[in-house]
Amino acid sequence: MTSISPLFKPFSCKNLHLDNRIVMAPMTRNMSPDGVPGQNVADYYARRAAADVGLIITEGTSIDRPGSSDNANVPNFYQDDAIKGWENVARQVHAKGGKIAPQLWHVGMTRKPGKGPFPDAISDGPSGITHTGKQVLPEPSESDIADMIASFGRAAKIAKEIGFDSVEIHGAHGYLVDEFFWEGMNIRSDQYGGSIENRSKFGADVIRSIRSEVGEDFPIILRFSQWKQQNYDAKLAKTPKELERFLGGLVDAGLDIFHCSTRRFWEPEFDGSDLNLAGWVKKITGLATITVGSVGLSSDFIGSLVNQESSEKRSLDELSERLEKGEFDLVAVGRALLQDPLWAQKVKAGKFDELSDYDPKAMAEYF
């Protein structure tokens, strides 16, 4: 059996210093009534921090654009009582020895009219079209786009002020930032549309906005994906060269870490190489990367979370070997940590027989 020691080596990026390479992946919970994370949310994250999770990335938390959220039970990152709630979350995680970053989220055109905490708000997107290509709203002006960008910066400033260790931008899965990336959603003809470089500019400007608010030593993470929840076979970049063109502006904007969302970490991203998406991104950019996708489990989240199917546990040997070779730097764990807050602690102690298959019906700790 391969040693799991690579998972428990320290990692540093600017002012972020982690005891190990295990990251709790962001997972939506809808457990914050009126957008306010309560003590139950603090307890949920603190349990994982106390059990050897190096970095916690929170569930998506909505920024201050009125159309950023489609559910009033999703936590927000702007109203006073929600900010106090998040400050308590960060404090509780730190008390257990962990580090934490909020995932800043805008759901974009996935939000249906009349949904969320501001039902009368207009949904934001790059072109006013839905994921099916239907034009339902006017194309937003550049001044509208400027405020979308600034909204991420405002949230990041709050995150640093109340004690978080980093921030992650949700730029994946068909939500707002990803809609600008994706040619299926972005049909603009200005500086934010057209070529893959132009389509990445919105994300780059979000990074610049955040950097201007948090300074140079506060790490910024971007989660992005090739796949979309509306099309699991979609690819932003079909070749390594195209991926390089997409990534360049994001790197130049001042990003620190790429969180490369895949459904199965062991799958090659492009023909002719065993590298996964995180491996390719690190090879191209030289920046640190987080890999994710069915870590510790045999099947992806679609079967588990959407179809409510069980998933057998999977050996960590291949993961550890890839990490040791430097293919990626950090490992995000989702469902395995969702079900078992002690997962990282058990792995560290070599208690693999105490790890269990994933059962979506046995989710008491989730709440």
Image (cartoon, rainbow, N blue to C red):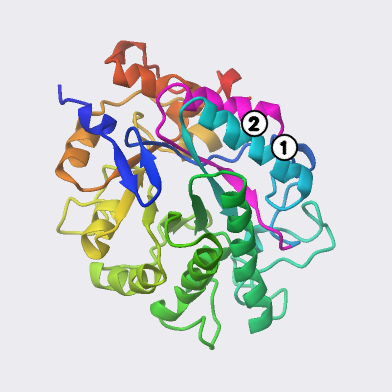
- Are dots 2 and 1 in contact, CB under 8 Å? yes
Relative to 193, residue 67 above or below: above
Query: Which quadrant of the figure contains the C terminus?
Result: top right
In the rendered structure, which segment of residues is drawn in magenta? 37-65
- Is residue 75 found left or right of 191 in the rendered image? right
Residue 128 visible to an observer of this rendering: no
Determine crowd level at label 1: few under 14, some 14-19, many 20+ residues with C-alpha closer than 10 A: many
Residue 155 lies in quadrant: bottom right
Membership of 41 in magenta stretch: yes
- Is residue 281 found left or right of 345 in the rendered image? left
Report x, y in % for residue 52. 40, 25
Q: Check residue 41 in the rendering and tell me which mark sits there, or answer none.
A: 2
Residue at mark 1: 32
Report x, y in % for residue 136. 72, 73
Determine crowd level at label 2: few under 14, some 14-19, many 20+ residues with C-alpha closer than 10 A: many
Observer-nearest of 117 and 357: 117
Q: How far is mark 2 from mark 1, CA to CA?
A: 8 Å
Membership of 312 in magenta stretch: no
Q: Earlier in the sequence, mark 2 or mark 1?
A: 1
- Label 2 amino acid? Val
Q: Residue at x 15, y 21 (%)?
A: 1
Helix, strand or loop at label 2? It is: helix
